[in-house]
Amino acid sequence: MINYLLKKLGYGLLVLLGVVSLVFFVFNLKPGDPARMVAGQKITPELIQAIERNLNLDLPIVQRFGIYLNDISPVSIHNETDESSRIFLDESKYSYTKLFPVGGENTLVIKAPYLNRSFQSKRSVSRIISQALPGTLILAIVSIVFALIIGVFGGVIAALNKDKWIDKLILILSVIGMSGPSFFMAILIAWIGGLLWFNSIPLPIIPFIIAAGLFVYFLVRDNRREESSKLLSMKSIRAVVKAVVIGFGLWLGLVLLVSMFSLGEWVYWSLSLPGTGLDMTGSLYSLDEWEGLYLNPRNLILPALTLGIRPLGVVVQLTRSSLLDVLKQDYIRTARAKGLSENKVVYKHALRNALNPVITAVSGWFASMLAGAVFVEFVFGWKGLGLEIFNALEKEDFPVVMGAVLVISFMFVILNILVDVLYGLIDPRVRVRS
């Protein structure tokens, strides 16, 4: 197990080194002058020279990369005495603990990674990320819990009703959820839930009465043509669609006739559908002029729903396919032969083993959601790491973008290592194959 863990840690470190190298060279080789961005409007040759030295822009890029690795590494070498040294142990920059001297004036230290300062606000990037990250983590956790609970439930229902209309309906909805781009779904859900449906809306009764009658008619007609066992199939879904379309079409025709010939208001009878009362934008904490800053979890509903739709579709399909495979295994037939109830067979024996691929998907999606939250947080105005990244990209504040990308990559690698270790503990065959 120790060798397995060390191997996974080694792979993780290689991935992180690759990400660090890619991020550094992409942002340092792009056109533009960071020194002028930091200087602002008061540009003088002396100021530009001082900023270039402070940012190590006057050094070759390979040497700058070495200093950058030294800054972000938790174990690094620094000079204690020479303030002109590029690796000077500046207490205003580093929070550190000394280990032991490493030749001459240099010392090996353990420290928090230093991610530089924002070009725009001059604040520490580490502080910016530490203040923004909790909002994104809360949003991602709520979204993945929502996707996991609803997705597993939907996958089980679909698997137990394989090839029936409910199975096909769940699969269609899951495909729609996976296919929708995050930014489009965010705009759509914000518009519907936060604007169109904010207040109560009238729901007309007549078209649903017509549609219900047509649906019964279509079912009776199909029941005469085919066996009743085939009734709960895609034909039922088509019957619903046809009934709703024709019902609303007839209702619109009635509305036109009533308005033309003044036949009364009965065609407008409706029920009041309660509104969501949810704002299009907002964060976990809201500011009130009387109460001050207060917790407002209602603002979490729409962005969490938006961010959880795509992993929800993945969880549904993985749970369904995995559970169908497990239900074909010999030990499931043995459990049924022993007289166990179907609920105990499914939920105690089959579902537990069917959730392994779901765990992998959830871990991967959770890390991906930290990156995917950029558009969702921007649309909903949610204060988190995604919104900080978007604002930093807009202002070309590259230290913030680089720091955020590194933090997300680090969390992605750590989560994958934890999942691999968890697999190794649950199933020793994984360790043997590795």
Image (cartoon, helix red, strand yellow):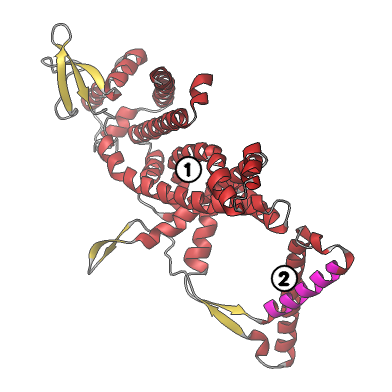
Furthest residue toward right: 225
Name the mark on residue 121. none
302 or 169: nearer the eye?
A: 169
Instruction: Give percent across and percent down for residue 87.
Output: 21, 17
Picture layout, residue 79 above or below residue 241:
above
How far from the left and from the top, in percent, is residue 108? 19, 15
Residue 209 in magenta? yes
Task: Identify which residue is drawn at 22% across, 69% down.
Answer: 290
Numbered mark located on residue 244 in the image: 2
From this viewpoint, which residue is outermost toward the front?
338
Q: Amino acid at mark 1?
A: Gly
Mark 2: few/some/many CA within 10 Å (<14, 14-19, 20+): many
Q: Would you say residue 326 is visible in this rendering?
A: yes
Q: Position of residue 327 (x, y in %)?
A: 65, 43
Q: How many badges with numbers are in the image?
A: 2
Which element type, helix, strand or loop, lies under badge 2?
A: helix
Magenta segment main secondary structure:
helix
**Part of the protein shown in magenta:** 208-223
Above or below residue 342? Residue 430 is above
Return the residue nearer the eye: 249 or 332.
332
